[in-house]
Amino acid sequence: MGNALMNFTINGQSVEVEADIRSSLLDLLRNSLGFTGTKKGCDQGACGACTVLVDGERINSCLALAVQYQGRSITTVEGLGSDGTLHPLQQAFVEHDGFQCGYCTPGQLCSAIGMAREIERNIPSVVTADLSADSVAVDETELRERMSGNLCRCGAYNGIVEAISETLGKMQEGARA
Amino acid sequence: MNPFSYERAADAAAAIGLAKGNAAARYLGGGTNLVDLMRETVERPEMLVDVTGLPHGIEPRADGGLLIGASATNTALAADSHVRTHYPLLARAILAGASAQIRNMATVGGNILQRTRCRYFYDTAAACNKREPGAGCDARDGFNRYHAILGASPACVATHPSDMCVALAALDATVHLDGPDGPRSIALADLHRLPGDRPDIETELKPGELIAAVEIPPLPFARRSTYRKVRDRASYAFALVSVAAALDLAEDGTVRDVRLALGGVAHKPWRASAAEAALKGRPANPESFRAAAEVELAAATGLRDNGFKIELAKRTIVAVLGDLTGDEA
């Protein structure tokens, strides 16, 4: 009960923080650590706005108890770019109008990067025709299915799909590194 | 969310020891359902025992079957090469569920023990016999488009939401349990209960027991198997109706063997044994498929909003079996 001292690596930095053990990873990031790039949409795992990467895997931080993720390496939208340079996917979102209000964008970005790693690792989706294939044949149907855990109320889906398609190869390369 | 203490268990014995004798303790897997229910105060555990550190291996057995540690994630199981080759219906069922983010978090044990998504169960201002025995059921005369058409009771019309379990039921999976009185095993098809007059008791698990592993026996003809989920949007929605099926065709075009299970229709994953019996030895054609579906759904009853599911289930059975025979259904 009460508070606990927790340790994480967030965007490459070691962080120690005392927080209520009822805190979700989302609330811990936003309220205790000031990483407000990660957004709270539904707070029940239905919208994907809170998506972050844990050891490279995308998860919904609203459904994650922070205390369960101690010692893990967490990447938020703040950790994607570097030194004033946008991540290639962020740049592509700008160029393809991958957002209007932008509220879902941090989750979309983290989710797409996690998705690229899943494709790189040949993890299938429900629309993958051949489950025994050695690699995923990526088309728009695959991208839309794999990104279905991220809702965009502005309906910027066409731009989002274009931005992700354009940078998928680069992101898969990043996942190999 | 009510206050609770948190303990991370190194192994099953430690987990069982921590939870022993504490009716307010809950085992915590990926948390995708339990944490949500705690936030709504539907679940109010005083202790969480984190079991994600328990075995998560996915290992082929000498007999051709598969042993799955309960802490394997949904993603890991769906991506496993043995599952994709030998049990494609299982891979497809898992991938039809939730979103990639949730599948990365959710464990196999947690998937099996997830609670219904009935809105009246979640809404603490509504009457729900499952949440509060004897309180009544607001779903029965409420918005019940997603509710059960088979095996329901006056007390409860909720459905079990898992896709994975529908495939596991079709595959005759066994669930290996561990608990204060030692290990035991139970068929997955017998683990979940029909609601009867105690919808609050959802499984045959005894106090303090946990799921340690799931074992799938070999089923060579499951290479010809699939899962179809019919839902209100193309992705990331619970099933209205789903069908898991595996088909073994004889050379003369009759059904040598078949496995069939339904999701979204009952308080538990619904093994369609009557339809299976009606299909064996029959020609693998739409007429036989329809006749078997009629037998299975003969006892189905609709509520105000879900009567369409009866015909939908029949048609989905016919379509899936048609897919597996190579016919256009």
Image: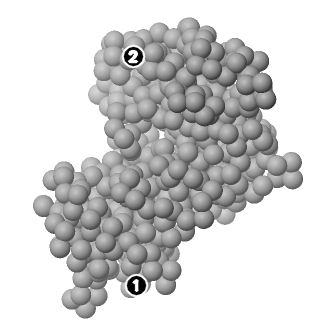
Q: Is residue B17 left or right of residue A176?
A: right
Q: Residue furthest bottom?
A: A83
Residue A12 — which label? 1
Measured along the vertical axis of the image, is residue B92 above or below residue B239? below
Q: Kindly report which numbered mark, 1 or 2, lies closer to the viewer in this rendering.
A: 2
Q: Mark 1 and mark 2 in contact? Answer it, CB < 8 Å.
A: no
Chain ID, mark 2: B
Residue A155 in view in this figure? yes
| Residue B276 placement (x, y as % from top left) | 69, 20
Which residue in the structure is indicated by mark 2?
B308
Q: Residue at x 40, y 13 (%)?
A: B307
In the rendered image, the quadrant that contains the N terminus of chain A is bottom left
- Nearer the observer, A130 or B189: A130
| Residue A122 placement (x, y as % from top left) | 55, 64
Determine the image quadrant of residue B269. top right
Same subunit: marks 1 and 2: no
Q: Residues within 10 Å of mark 1 (few under 14, many from 20)?
A: few
User: Mark 2 belongs to which amino acid?
Assistant: Phe
| Residue B241 placement (x, y as % from top left) | 47, 27
